[in-house]
Image (cartoon, helix red, strand yellow):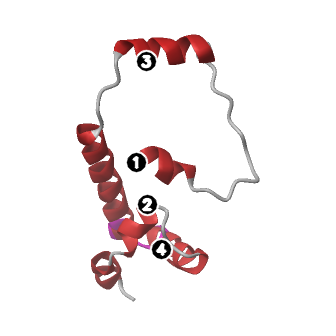
Amino acid sequence: MNEEELIASGLLELYVTGSLTEQELREVEQAMLQSPKVRAEVEAIERALMLSSARMAPKPADRVWKNVSERTSGAIPIRTGGSKRNWNAITGW
């Protein structure tokens, strides 16, 4: 599949949302390494999704942020390895 077909296929949108199979994931990542145009398209899709989600998300009340800040003391533990979930896609939404 050439870069134009890949861009038109919808696979890049699925890549950004973490919805591809392992094989499709490898194919898209390889295409991104080989083609600046494909990489730029993925970045544009990511920006569009982030902007869309930021516009649609309700703004939490100030007391919610205060409560979260107090409970975490500014430090949020990060777990590594062992997780099969695509947390980037989950937190993006």
C-alpha span from label 2 to label 4: 13 Å
Residue at the right extreme? Answer: 82
> Which residue does the image show at 36% across and 86% down from the upper left?
2
Q: Is there CB contact under 8 Å for labels 1 and 3? A: no
Residue at the bottom extreme? Answer: 1
C-alpha span from label 1 to label 4: 21 Å
> Which residue does the image show at 42% across and 61% down from the upper left?
16
Q: Nearer the viewer, mark 1 or mark 2?
A: 1
Mark 3 closeness class: few <14, some 14–19, many ≥20 residues within 10 Å = few
> Which residue does the image show at 50% across and 72% down from the upper left?
20
Asked which quadrant contains residue 44, the reply is: bottom left
C-alpha span from label 3 to label 4: 39 Å
Q: Is there CB contact under 8 Å for labels 3 and 4? A: no
Q: Nearer the viewer, mark 3 or mark 4?
A: 3
Q: Is there CB contact under 8 Å for labels 1 and 2? A: yes
Numbered disc 3: secondary structure: helix
* Residue denoted by label 3: 64
Earlier-in-chain disc, 3 versus 2 = 2
The amino acid type of the residue labelled 3 equals: Val
C-alpha span from label 1 to label 2: 9 Å
- Left or right of 58: which side holds 11? right
Question: Magenta stretch containing residue 35, yes or no?
Answer: yes
Looking at the picture, how far across and down is residue 14, in whole percent?
41, 68
* Residue denoted by label 2: 17
Earlier-in-chain disc, 2 versus 4 = 2
